[in-house]
Image (cartoon, helix red, strand yellow):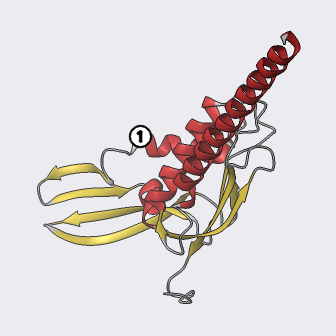
Amino acid sequence: MAIIIIAVLMYVVQNAASLKKTEQERETAEQVTKFNMEYESYQKSLLRGTELVSIINKAIANNKKYEDNDKVYDIDIQFKLKTPIKETIVTIEDGKKKKTEEKVTFGEAKTYKLIDNKQSDRISKDISQFMEIGALNSSNSYEIINYKDIDNYQMIYSGFTDFKRKIFKCTNIEYSDVTGRVNLLGFEEVDLKEDTSGY
């Protein structure tokens, strides 16, 4: 009788442990699905630079949150520029646009990566510098300088403003073999004058 009771108790304990493990696995799978959906929503053929800025900020926050977890939860965001980022200076004289000047302030036509293993915080210098420019210019799309009166001044649209106006498409999405979570999103600048496929 004692043996039967012990066997039943062992069965109940093992079954309870198995159910708990199954429940934990189900919850983990749901969390991964929910997490992935946040990033998969950016898997578009057309998105503005403003959305790409949001993704970069989201990935930076994620990587900082899990910086002690052996990098298995890291997300890399990569984007390829086809044209440099420019600063635009518009001169207004007597209430009318007199001239527009452009100068390259940031960005060669190449691929930029968020994660750089050579950096101590693993954030690439290029993107870090770029996001700092954005933080300084977050309130307005332009800055007024050389203000003389209501009809005579200059407006500077920063390179960050130029980036936010660019159009991108998602070209790549990858998932971690360890966690099942999105760990890389790739984007490429679209020149609507050249690339009209799918639009």
**Relative to 135, 11 lies left or right:** right
SS at mark 1 in the image: helix
Toward the viewer: 143 or 100? 143
Extreme residue toward the right, this view: 3
Q: Percent x, y for residue 116? A: 76, 43
In this picture, is 72 found above or below 197? above
In this picture, is 81 found above or below 159? below
Question: Disc 1 residue type?
Answer: Leu
Extreme residue toward the left, this view: 150
Residue 110's image quarter?
bottom right
Extreme residue toward the front, this view: 1
Q: Percent x, y for residue 87? A: 45, 59
Q: Percent x, y for residue 180? A: 72, 49
In this picture, is 166 found above or below 59? below
Residue at 22 percent across and 64 percent down: it is: 92
Residue at 84 percent across and 18 percent down: it is: 4
Which quarter of the figure is the N terminus placed in?
top right
- Residue beneath label 1, please? 136
Residue 72's image quarter?
top right
In this picture, is 138 found above or below 81? above
Crowding at label 1, few (<14), some or many (≥20) Cα neighbours within 10 Å?
few
**Relative to 43, 177 lies left or right:** right
**Relative to 28, 11 lies left or right:** right
Residue at 48 percent across and 68 percent down: it is: 47
Q: How many marks?
A: 1
Residue at 75 percent across and 32 percent down: it is: 18
Toward the viewer: 22 or 86? 22
